[in-house]
């Protein structure tokens, strides 16, 4: 689970609340709010911290701040308006009175970012345009589609610590509704960490503090690649004496299905852990460092990106069921399990790759050399990465999702995704993630909209149960790839999953 950032014991934070209609009576007037505005002061560098403030100054500031801010004080609207004026459901406690805080420890804000709240919701942009704490409410969507989203005032997107998450369209009919926004960094209480946590354009505003830790902004975190070691260095953000370090990581939908993490971590009790991710997507990382007197945390997103088109498959009970992922191009005019054209375990792994019929050029070795199952040795001998390719056959590496990659697809080609129940027993509920240019754009089979009736294993030849998942149409513009995804349904229906039995037709 993702940790909740601790408060620095030297600092008292503001608290962000979601406002319901019952709280409207407690909101201060706009005139009072505007009178509390202050100015964005400069950050305090690490070099200045040790000698800039005496212990007496710090203690006096903390005592003053504790006395000045009630734990359940009145709430202020972020935009300085009232519920009647803006309908803004995101509110912030009153800033502390600076009297008694040393001037050099004040972090003020007199030019905050406009929250950007509007009267009406705009469908399809993943934002809470009307600031009622709901995203694209009342907007229809296609079940399985995934869009970027932001849980906060729309003007705060990509400001300070804030970065967008993703939400999946849920439902079992032709038109669904957007589910919760997950995986991003959204406005949170301001903490003394030299980072703009509430994303209003000013770091540490409303606090009386000298940061002992400098948490990273989203642009400070480098992207990662699947199956490639990725090292973090906590001393970039906290360089003082530490008693302990801990790192917590939260992944995407497959982590919940597998019941185990889609990553490994080495050195998780040190300042410099090494992570290795088995999936694409966004991972939320929380670093906690404990000193003799305090506990500090930083939470940020690591984007794990594979190029081109990437399809990932996971399911529960991977040790007792063998389920296979297939990918076939429509223009090849072939049936499933055609070993000369269908990309799957028989011909698409490094150890048995044989798909020259696709006509694609190889990609850089760096995209595949660290894949599991000993296949890295084959790609290294080849000196490049084949396209397409299967990085993982789950039967030999249980718990790691299967994935098929087309690093450099051609313009205007359609790829069909199929899942085959090869062996084992019991009903399975496979889940498929589709990524395009490193971004998750569709997820099928996620609870509560799981695949049902997928229980008959058929072994070789694509017999037994097969699930036609979706068609993906690729568009290529230079080095950029975009995709149109169309879910596949039973014949004559506009919803539901297309699960067939003993049928190898495209």
Image (cartoon, grey):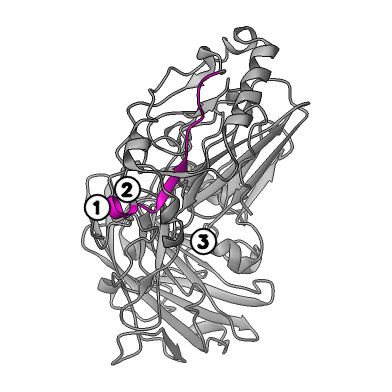
User: Which of the two residues, 357 or 440, is positioned nearer the viewer here?
Assistant: 440
Cα separation, mark 2 vs mark 1, equals 9 Å
Please state which of residues 273 and 192 is positioned toward the viewer in this rendering: 192
In the picture, which quadrant includes the N terminus? Answer: bottom right
Q: Secondary structure at mark 1?
A: loop
Q: Pointer 1: residues within 10 angstroms few (<14), some, or many (20+)?
A: some
Question: Which class describes the residues within 10 Å of circle 2: few (<14), some (14-19), or many (20+)?
Answer: many
Q: How many labels sit on residues?
A: 3
Which residue position holds label 1? Answer: 118
Q: Earlier in the sequence, mark 3 or mark 1?
A: 1
Q: CA distance from mark 2 to mark 3?
A: 44 Å
Q: Measuring from the top left, give residue 444's x and y in whole percent.
A: 43, 72
Find residue 349 and name its label: 3
Query: What residue span does the magenta drawing correspond to?
Result: 83-99
Q: Is residue 271 above or below residue 154?
A: above
Q: Is residue 210 above or below residue 371?
A: above
Membership of 402 in magenta stretch: no
The residue shown at (23%, 59%) is: 120
Secondary structure under the numbered disc 2 in the rendered image: helix
Which residue is depicted at the point 27% across and 56% down? 482
């Amino acid at each position: 689970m993702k940790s909740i950032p601790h408060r620095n014991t030297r600092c008292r934070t503001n608290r962000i609340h979601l406002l319901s209609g019952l709280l409207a009576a407690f909101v201060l007037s706009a005139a009072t709010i505007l009178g509390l505005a202050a100015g964005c002061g400069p950050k305090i560098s690490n070099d200045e911290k040790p000698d800039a403030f005496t212990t007496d100054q710090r203690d006096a500031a903390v005592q003053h701040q504790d006395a000045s801010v009630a734990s359940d004080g009145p709430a202020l609207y972020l935009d300085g308006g009232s519920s009647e004026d803006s309908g803004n459901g995101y509110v912030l406690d009153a800033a502390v009175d600076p009297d008694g805080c040393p001037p050099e420890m004040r972090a003020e804000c007199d030019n905050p970012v406009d929250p950007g709240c509007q009267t009406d919701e705009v469908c399809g942009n993943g934002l809470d345009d009307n600031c009622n704490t709901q995203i694209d409410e009342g907007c229809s969507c296609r079940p399985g589609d995934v869009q970027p989203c932001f849980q906060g005032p729309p003007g705060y997107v990509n400001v300070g610590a804030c970065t967008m998450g993703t939400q999946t369209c849920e439902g079992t009919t032709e038109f669904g509704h957007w589910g919760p926004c997950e995986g991003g960094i959204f406005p949170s209480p301001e903490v003394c960490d030299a980072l703009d946590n509430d994303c209003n354009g000013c770091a540490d505003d409303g606090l009386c503090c000298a940061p002992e830790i400098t948490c990273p902004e989203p642009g400070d975190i480098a992207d990662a690649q699947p199956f490639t070691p990725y090292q973090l260095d906590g001393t970039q953000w906290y360089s003082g004496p530490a008693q302990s370090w801990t790192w917590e990581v939260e992944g995407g939908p497959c982590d919940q299905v597998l019941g185990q993490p889609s990553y490994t971590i080495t050195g998780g009790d040190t300042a410099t852990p090494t992570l290795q991710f088995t999936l694409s997507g966004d991972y939320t990382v929380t670093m906690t460092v404990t000193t003799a007197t305090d506990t500090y945390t930083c939470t940020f997103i690591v984007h794990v990106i594979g190029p081109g088109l990437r399809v990932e498959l996971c399911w529960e009970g991977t040790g007792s069921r063998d389920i296979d992922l297939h990918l076939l191009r429509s223009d090849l005019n072939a049936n499933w399990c055609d070993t000369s054209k269908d990309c799957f375990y028989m011909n698409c792994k490094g150890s048995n790759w044989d798909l020259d019929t696709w006509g694609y050029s190889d990609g850089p070795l760096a995209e595949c050399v660290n894949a599991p199952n000993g296949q890295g040795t084959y790609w290294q001998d080849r000196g490049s990465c084949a396209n397409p390719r299967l990085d993982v056959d789950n039967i030999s590496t249980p718990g790691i999702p299967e994935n098929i990659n087309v690093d450099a697809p051609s313009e205007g080609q359609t790829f069909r995704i199929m899942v085959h129940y090869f062996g084992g027993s019991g009903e399975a509920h496979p889940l498929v993630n589709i990524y395009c240019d490193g971004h998750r754009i569709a997820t099928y089979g996620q609870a509560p909209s799981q695949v049902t009736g997928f229980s008959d294993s058929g072994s070789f030849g694509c017999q037994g149960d097969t699930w036609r998942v979706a068609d993906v149409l690729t568009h290529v513009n230079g080095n950029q790839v975009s995709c149109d995804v169309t879910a596949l349904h039973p014949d004559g229906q506009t919803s539901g999953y297309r699960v067939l039995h003993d049928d190898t037709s495209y």
